[in-house]
Amino acid sequence: MTRAEVLGAYVVNEHGVIMSPGKFEGCMLYVPAFWDLCMDGFTDFEDGGVHGMAFDDSDRDMWPEIGATYGMFLEEDNLGFVHAQEFETKEDYDAACVLLAAQEDFEQEKE
């Protein structure tokens, strides 16, 4: 989704938060676009239904609301709502990827 498509599809407040009811309610306006990318297989990391993406300069050009955030995890809950967890630094993002992979390995070993 482009910025124009997101702004045409959702009510967004002055802080860039989607106010429209539905799966992206309460998310930043760029989340639907990145969710679409995840669903098309464009992720940097995926584990147990969690999709990770690191932002680059072209992302920041299109979505200035990203600011200095390094990346985020996106996950859809069992009710169909998408949740985003943002990471300010590469170190935080990488550590979360390692932790998530370790948790998934632990869950698989228990089975």
Image (spheres, helix red, strand yellow):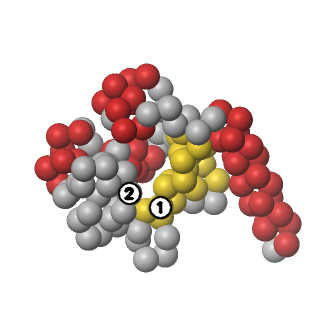
Residue found farthest to the bottom: 79
Q: Which residue is drawn at 23% across and 54% down?
A: 12
* Residue 70 spot, x, y in % from top left: 55, 35
* Amino acid under disc 2: Cys
Rendering quarter of residue 104? bottom right
* Amino acid under disc 1: His
Look at mark 2 in the image and give the residue it sits on. 27
Residue found farthest to the front: 14
Residue 40 in view: no
The Cα atoms of the two marked residues, 2 and 1, are separated by 7 Å
Question: In the rendered view, would you say 40 is above or below 13?
Answer: above
Q: Residue at x 31, y 30 (%)?
A: 62
Please give left or right for residue 3 compared with residue 89 in the image.
left
Please give left or right for residue 101 compared with residue 17 in the image.
right
Is 82 in front, or is 20? 20
* Residue 39 spot, x, y in % from top left: 42, 50
* Residue 60 spot, x, y in % from top left: 39, 29
Is 86 in front, or is 9? 86
Which numbered disc covers residue 83? 1
Q: Determine contact: label 2, label 1, CB under 8 Å.
A: yes
Q: Which residue is drawn at 29% across and 69% down?
A: 22
Question: In the rendered view, would you say 24 is above or below 53?
Answer: below
Q: Residues within 10 Å of mark 2 (few under 14, many from 20)?
A: many
Is 45 in front, or is 16? 16
Which numbered disc covers residue 70? none
Query: Given this view, does label 2 or label 1 mark the residue nearer the observer?
Result: 2
Rendering quarter of residue 100? bottom right
* Residue 111 spot, x, y in % from top left: 81, 74
Secondary structure state at the residue bearing disc 1: strand
